[in-house]
């Protein structure tokens, strides 16, 4: 049994969309996914990409992904890593694949002198939260996410 974690390749945009949809299904948010293969090709594999993806292969089979980008902390005066998606297919779980994906991003933080590694998790996703506790993550209970989208975004843009 062998685990390989590597950067996603341009010909894997379809696989990445599949992973995104499987994760959204698990999160009961499949109806919110509108991202296309073309979107992923443009944003991950076009010129000067600002979002990145690592793929985990188990014995050569695609098993999971970590999709991430750089954010910035003014308090720390350092960029950090924001993890957008972490997903391991059910058949491959419990073998250290997610831990491997997270360790690779943690190493990138250390190697690049980044201040933070962070992400969101749904409150009901207790299995993932247990996993995050096991790797040393702490919850930011005093913060809530704010979002402007759709008609509210248009209205705000029009002043
Ligand atoms: C959460 C998830 C990414 C974990 O992936 P995984 O590859 O099974 O996790 P690992 O095998 O790397 O687990 C690493 C460690 O966490 C522990 N762990 C993993 N899942 C756990 C769970 N559900 N409950 C308790 N502990 C767990 C493992 O026991 C292991 O501990 P060890 O190092 O002491 O052996 C995977 O279950 C998944 O994709 N879930 C659905 C999607 C999801 O919730 N994504 C996160 C959205 S924020």
Image (spheres, grey):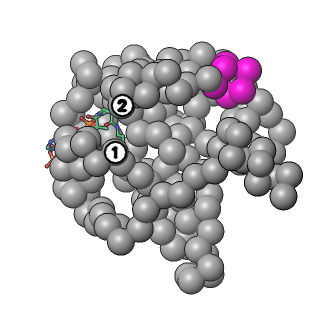
Quick check: marks 1 and 2 in contact, CB under 8 Å?
A: yes
User: Based on the displayed image, in which of its 4 quarters is residue 100 positioned?
Assistant: top left
Q: Residues within 10 Å of mark 2 (few under 14, many from 20)?
A: few
Q: Residue 17 appears at what percent x and percent y?
A: 56, 21
Question: Magenta residues: mostly which secondary structure?
Answer: helix
Distance of label 1 from label 2 (alpha carbons): 8 Å
Q: Nearer the viewer, residue 69 or 56?
A: 69
Q: Nearer the viewer, residue 44 or 26?
A: 26
Position of 11 with respect to 156 (left or right) is left
Q: Nearer the viewer, residue 149 or 22?
A: 149
What residue appears at the point 78 percent right and 44 percent down from the top-left corner? 154
Does the beta carbon of the residue at mark 2 sit less than 8 Å from ligand 1? yes
- Quarter of the picture for ligand 1? top left
What residue appears at the point 23 percent right and 29 percent down from the top-left corner? 93
Q: Which residue is mark 1?
A: 122
Q: Which residue is mark 2?
A: 27
Q: Is residue 118 above or below residue 16?
A: below
Give yes or no for residue 141 being in the magenta stretch: no
Q: Residue 9 appears at what percent x and percent y?
A: 63, 27
Image: magenta residue range: 35-40
Quadrant where the N terminus sits is: top left
Can residue 43 be seen here? The reply is yes
């Amino acid at each position: 049994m062998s685990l390989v974690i590597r950067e996603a390749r341009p010909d894997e945009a379809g696989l990445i969309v599949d992973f995104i949809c499987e994760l959204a299904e698990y999160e009961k948010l499949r109806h919110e996914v509108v991202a296309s293969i073309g979107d992923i090709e443009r944003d991950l594999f076009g010129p000067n990409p600002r979002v990145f993806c690592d793929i985990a292969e188990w014995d050569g089979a695609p098993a999971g992904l970590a999709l991430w980008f750089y954010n910035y902390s003014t308090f720390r005066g350092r960029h950090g890593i924001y993890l957008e998606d972490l997903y391991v297919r059910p058949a491959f779980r419990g073998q250290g694949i997610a831990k491997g994906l997270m360790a690779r991003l943690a190493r990138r933080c250390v190697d690049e002198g980044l201040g933070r590694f962070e992400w969101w998790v749904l409150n009901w996703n207790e299995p993932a939260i247990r996993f995050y506790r096991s790797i040393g993550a702490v919850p930011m209970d005093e913060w809530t996410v704010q979002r402007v989208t759709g008609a509210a975004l248009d209205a705000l843009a029009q002043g």
